[in-house]
Image (spheres, helix red, strand yellow):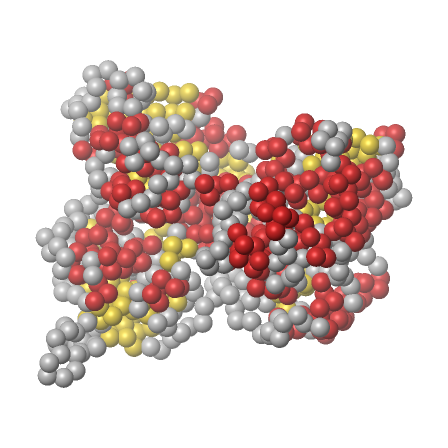
Amino acid sequence: MTSVVDRPQGRHATTPPRRRLVVIGNGMAGARAVEEILARGGAGKFTITMFGDEPYGNYNRIMLSHVLSGEESHADIFLNSLSWYRENNITLHAGVRAERIDKFTRHVFSSDGRVTPYDVLIIATGSRSHMPPMDGLYTPGGSVKQGVFGFRTLDDTQRMVAHAQEEHHRRAVVIGGGLLGLEAAYGLRSHGLDVEVVHSGGHLMNAQMGPDGGAVLRRSVEALGIGVHTGSRTTAVLGTDRVTGISLRDQPDISCDMVVVAAGIRPNVDLAVLSGLPVERAIVVDDRLRVQDEEDIYAVGECVQHRGEVYGLVAPLWEQAVVLANHVTGADTSAAYLGSRTATKLKVAGVEVASMGLHGPERDSDEHIVFSEPSRGVFKSIVVRDNKMVGATLLGDSRKVAFLTQAYDRGLPLPEERHNLLFDLGAPDGDVGVAELDDDAQVCNCNGVNKKALVGAVKGGCTTVAGAMDATRAGKGCGSCKLLVQQVVEWAAGGAVEEDPAASYYVPGIPLDKPALMDEIRKRGLRSVSQVFQALAPGSLEDAKSKMGLASLLKMMLADQYIDERDARFINDRVHANIQRDGTFSVVPQMKGGVTSVQQLRRIADVAEKHKVPLIKLTGGQRIDLLGIPKEDLPQVWADLDMPSGYAYGKSFRTVKTCVGKDFCRYGTGDSTKLGIEIESRFQGIESPAKLKLAVSGCPRNCAESLVKDVGVVAVEGGRWEIYVGGAAGAHIRKGDLLATVDDPEQVKVLTGRFMQYYREQANWLERTYAYVPRVGIEHLRAVVVEDSEGIAARLDTAMHASVDNYVDPWSERNDPLTPGQFRTSLPLTVLPRVPVQ
């Protein structure tokens, strides 16, 4: 008998009872199914409970490669915030595994001991990384060896980033040359690692393209500095406790510090097998997405086998979710999922790739039209059968993908001159192709947005491309569809698309660009973040995303006249330490120029011992990092250290890295250590649009890595110094531009301060110098900062002096907290407690 909850009480109750809907899986497929159910009035029909293995809300798994490369933060890829679950009355058990289903009594048994009844059940357990058989993959205890990673979850990605950023790690091997493997390699390369891809197939991405396209792709990948080994099978992971390399069949061993296994995925079916559900390659479902022979159990996503097929792309998941929702809610009981013709359009390792259908001819009568330009990384292939397109591969140029996708899906008639399929010579141009797209044609594969949804956003009042993207999530994934999104929006608006005014705002909550914002602050005498909102955005709520940028700008402009409001600060700046993923904090005392003493080292060691610090880590900026400190212990740790803050947490001047210099080094031509200490002493902690890392090298051998810093100084022959600006060595790698060559250290300090002040006044919020310098141009910076072409050098120097003179060590607040809760115990911010979200 079906049980119900929320049964109406009393003789005259007319509200129908709501059935209990339980969803096992809070990933992209499970959450999308729930979204579709809610869109069909499911909130009034069901009480909804969701279980998710991971201790998070729903995030975009496709974007993990962007988190790995540093292009996005983990916070940027979440699709549904916790408030979404609350607003829709969904009970979410995050970080709780469903372990067994009793399909006879209709209960789900979970890892926290809970027994949850259901009337309708949806299984969306997804897939996991496949670990192919090889020796040495696991330790004797059965765990994966240190330095070996799968690449499937947010936790996987964060661990990979942490491992890649450890200073002594230099080489990585990625096993698998498919889409995921190449994305992993690209992301690791952005951290400065030497990366090699080992692929057992004969060419890269052999599931999406033929050997000719694979050869062009290989050339593009190798141009990024990534080594490629095809036709190679990994037989063993070397190393006793940690990875030291891999062994290949019939090829020499490769040494490495890190191995990422991206050799495919496998459906998560253990729960279904244990519960007696039909499983072959995956959970067997019918055209309604109903589990075979089960009345009220459905399955969706990568854990599903439909008509013998298992799909690992997102577009089929979205199609499945629609059919499932129609049946679960009764909105359309005739809906049927008949399988998907997969057309993929993605950006892989920075290269645009589109693939659909056949990779090459399979019959003598098939036509094969190919264009290849390896020097530009361009390859195009079309397969035609019976005057219908049955396959296409586009590499490096996907401008025709809208028309080709439509031709593939709908069997459109093709031009007699086949080359028109590849170029805008006779086939529809972009606008005509967009007009001919079906309403349900997928525009954004990553977030499952079709043409109809974008058009609806425009008709609903979105007047800018950015507005339509925000409303639908289109273009918020890999980014390869942005051009098509723009074309659809412009077509839907009849060409009357407004330029997005918010693109020029310094912070999103104040409708002004930076010069106008600074001018208004000065004219109105504004002194605090709340005053700025009251004066410049009256009647609107204070935008949380804008507060930190405004606080930094005001402090830079006003020095000691700034009124500090703690709710305008990020947690790091409120407690002057760097929050970690488990809610503890990292403390980095200052060591000017990377120089320390016996007394400092002894004090740090004593503090670490006294407070049982779980990890002591040397940083890339030549400092000692104490990690794992609870929030409430911070004041005592600072008091015991009795050293200034090292500013390892804020958008501010952080460190000056130095080499040994001329006193001890055989090659040193300048006293880099002394100059580095003087620069750090002078500019310590000043506010900035983004963090500032500096370095001083005592000779052109550049041991302090000065050429890849925000400001880098290098001693050269004749007692002179070169000043470089705009370098980077993190997620983005860029050699700095030469700003000036000067004769003495005092000029170095003056020009360094002047450049940083000009950058502080002109740069966008969170714009690093490696983006700012090429945007503005080194010639312009040289003219303003060195030659004083605009006559503002004296003012820049004075403004920097004011900031320097206003410096106060933030750790002095340990004895006098500014707010009662400043150092109260904090809950973990990443891992959610195992309680329902009501």
Q: Closer to the camera, 151 or 426?
A: 426
x 67%, y 34%: residue: 736
**Where does residue 476 sit, x and y in percent of width and height?**
40, 45
Residue 449: quarter of image: top left
In this view, the residue farthest toward the bottom is 10
Q: Closer to the camera, 550 or 829?
A: 550
**Where does residue 533 sit, x and y in percent of width and height?**
53, 56
Relative to 568, 470 lies left or right:
left
**Where does residue 611 sit, x and y in percent of width and height?**
69, 73
Q: Closer to the camera, 346 or 189?
A: 346
**Would residue 393 be visible to someone looking at this image?**
no
x 21%, y 77%: residue: 6
In this view, the residue farthest toward the right is 663
In this view, the residue farthest toward the front is 524
- Rendered position, 73 above or below 458: below
Which quarter of the rendered picture does the N terminus lie within? bottom left
Residue 489: quarter of image: top left
